[in-house]
Every structure is written in C-alpha cells, then in structure tokens.
C-alpha cells in the first residue's frame, strides 16, 4: 500500500487543461479579532447564494471536522473541502476518519487538502517536528489516497508508518489537495495531488505555478491537477475592511517565501520592517491599501470582477473567495454581488447546476456598485 507511482488526478473535470472548467467557492476565513461563530454566518450566506463548494481550514477556534459537521447540518452546500490540514499534526488515518465521519453522518461530499502549515503551529502549539515537509506530504498523500479508497493501511516510510487500519465508510471520490508554496512543495503537489492550493498570491504568481505544475505533471506522466487559489474579496471596502486585511497580511510579511514575494511586488520596506520587529499592531498601520489589492479582489464591483477574471486568465481553475466582514456582516453583500454577476461559475440558489466554462463574468460599469 502507499506506493509512490503516479496516480491520475481526480475530481471535477480531471483529465487535462483542455476540459478543466472554472468555478467559484467560498472560504471560511479566520480573520483576526473576529467572533468565532462568524464562520457559521458566512457559511449560511454562501449557501443562500448557491455556492456549491465551501473550504474550511483549522486555526485556533474549532476542530475542523466538528465545524464541517455543523456547517453541513445547517446549510445546503453540497461539497466541503476540509483543510489545508498540517501533515505534521494529523496522521493520514485521523484525516481519513474525520473526512469519512463528516461525509457519512451528513451526506455531504467531503474533499481534503493537506499542507505544511508553519513552525509556530506545528512545533510550538503541537510539539511536533516541522522538518521534511515535502517528503512527509508525499507520503501522507499516498497513504490517504489508499485509505479513502477503502484499502487497508500497510505503509512504512520515513515519516509515516501505519498498519492494519481500514475505513468502514470509504470515500473513493474525495479529492486530495496540497497547499504549495515553494518549488519543492509545488513539485510534490503536481505529482501527487488532485488539486494544488495557493493563498495570498497575485495573478502573476498563478501563471508561474500553472506552468510549473503542468511541467511536473507531464514529466510524471499524469494529467495536471487543478489549480485553486484563495482570494480575499471585498466590494466597496471601508476603512475597517482595509484594517482587517492589513491585520491579516501583517502575519505573512515575515515568513520566508511570502516575504520575498511581497518584496517582488514592491513592498520590501514592509517586509524588512516586519522581520525587524515583533509589533504586529504597529505594522498594521503602515500597510497601504495597495498591498491587499495586489493579492486580492478589492474595490468597486467592476474592479472585483476584473480581478477574479485575471486570476482565471492566469491559469486558476477554482477561486475560493475569502470575504471580508468588518464592514460587511458575514460577507453578505460581497457574496451576493459576485453570485449575481458571475452566475455561470456557481449553481443557482436552488442548488441546480448551471453550465460552467471560460469567462462566466458579466461585465458591468464602475458606476454599478
């Protein structure tokens, strides 16, 4: 079990770029200094607007599988993606059991995403080893794929060792995504995952990663996985929204990889400031509106739609919308606007599927919204 041979990518429209379709989903964000239960409000708004896919991560509030069960029981969203979950914290058996539990108890389709997370969360919070993430992720995907497929665990790798466990309720149609930041994790994701997941990146970075995963997958002899990107979005943001965005971005200025990317975007002074100080609140005051705009879809209605189109045109197959909430309760206005003007990229409010494909966004003038 758990061999390292190439597996064909699975999931919606798997099988190559020629047949991949574009889609929009919603991400339950973990904005700093917001009420924990806001996540349920956002989920209800996504459901009311007909979004067919919801992403649920895990930070310092809820156990993600408990949250997924609550969301599935309180909405009509047909597809949940749990993660990215830290491969250094949860074992493949624990992840498979969690996904199968939610799917079986609620009747909702559950996909899974894996990632490295951060040394702060993995080592300081959980006391686990954060090293060797590319190899650990590769082993985790191999084991998890076979567990979800109903096979009995029998794997002994450098990081993952498991034997004898078998799911009572296999989930063979569940997709496995991998959060990829950096060339080694991108290679692992392209060679093993059904979907590559990115966060807080500009469209130019999407184009670079799209080219990389296509090349890695071709060399591996498998169809290229889908490319998903989480994009913070806000229609007509106010001062509180910009502060909310800046507060979140301040956390990402310091880490390797993100800091270099922000430097390339012209914010090197902020990166150096972040790495020289531990005062996040002071840093927040210095982040200009141009920074969240560079890695999100922020502005007038027309600007938000054009930005979404830019991510798709750069090579994204799926965009997970991360709605701001400081000026827009539960992201209601932003999600309503996008669902109204991008109907071909999501199902209707009744849950009926609509055709999806290239474009999908109705043009509007800047004066509308």
Image: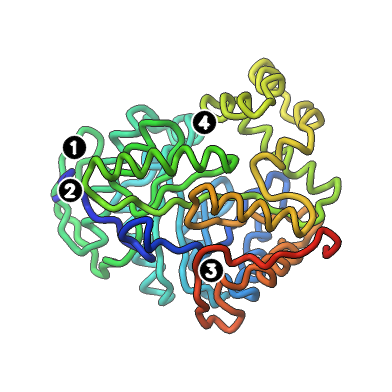
Q: CA distance from mark 2 to mark 4?
A: 29 Å
Query: Secondary structure beneath disc 3?
Result: helix
Horizontal relation, residue 81 to residue 162: left or right? right
Local packing at callout 2 (Cα closer than 10 Å; few below 14, some 14-19, many 20+) is: many
Q: Are discs 2 and 4 less than 8 Å apart at CB?
A: no
Query: Secondary structure beneath disc 1?
Result: loop
- Name which residue lies at 68% across and 50% down: 297
Nearer-N-terminus badge (3/4): 3
For the image shown, how many numbered marks are present on the structure? 4
Q: Are discs 2 and 1 less than 8 Å apart at CB?
A: yes
Q: Which residue is mark 3?
A: 70
Q: Which residue is mark 4?
A: 120
Instruction: Please give the label number shown on residue 177.
Output: none
Q: CA distance from mark 2 to mark 3?
A: 32 Å
Horizontal relation, residue 334 to residue 46: left or right? right
Instruction: Please give the label number shown on residue 2.
Output: 2
Q: Position of residue 94 (x, y in %)?
A: 33, 53
């Amino acid at each position: 079990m758990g061999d390292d041979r190439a597996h064909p990518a699975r999931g919606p429209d798997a099988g190559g770029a020629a047949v991949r379709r574009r889609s929009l989903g919603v991400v339950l964000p973990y904005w700093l200094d917001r009420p924990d239960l806001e996540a349920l409000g956002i989920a209800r708004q996504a459901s009311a607007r007909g979004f067919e896919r919801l992403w649920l991560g895990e930070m310092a509030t809820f156990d993600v599988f408990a949250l997924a069960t609550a969301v599935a029981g309180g909405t009509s969203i047909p597809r949940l993606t749990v993660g990215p979950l830290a491969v250094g914290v949860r074992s493949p058996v624990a992840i498979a059991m969690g996904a199968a539990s939610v799917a079986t108890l609620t009747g909702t389709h559950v996909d899974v995403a894996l990632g490295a997370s951060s040394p702060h969360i993995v080592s300081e919070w959980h006391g686990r080893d954060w090293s060797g993430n590319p190899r650990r992720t590769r082993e985790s995907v191999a084991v998890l794929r076979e567990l979800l497929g109903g096979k009995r665990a029998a794997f002994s790798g450098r990081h993952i060792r498991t034997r004898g466990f078998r799911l009572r309720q296999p989930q063979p149609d569940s997709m496995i995504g991998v959060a990829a930041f950096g060339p080694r994790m991108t290679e692992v994701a392209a060679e093993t995952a059904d979907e590559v997941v990115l966060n807080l990146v500009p469209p130019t970075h999407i184009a670079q990663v799209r080219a990389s995963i296509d090349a890695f997958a071709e060399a591996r002899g498998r169809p290229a996985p889908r490319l998903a990107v989480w994009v913070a979005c806000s229609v007509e943001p106010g001062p509180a929204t910009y502060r909310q965005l800046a507060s979140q971005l301040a956390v990402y200025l310091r880490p390797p990889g993100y800091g270099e990317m922000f430097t390339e975007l012209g914010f090197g002074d902020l990166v150096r400031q972040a790495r020289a100080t531990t005062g996040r609140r002071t840093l927040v005051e210095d982040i200009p509106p141009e920074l969240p705009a560079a890695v999100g879809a922020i502005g007038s209605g027309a600007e938000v739609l054009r930005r979404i189109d830019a991510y798709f045109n750069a090579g994204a197959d799926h965009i997970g919308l991360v709605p701001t909430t400081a000026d827009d309760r539960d992201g209601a206005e932003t999600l309503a606007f996008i669902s109204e003007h991008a109907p071909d990229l999501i199902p209707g409010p009744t849950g009926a599927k609509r055709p999806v494909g290239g474009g999908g966004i109705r043009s509007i003038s800047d004066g509308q919204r």
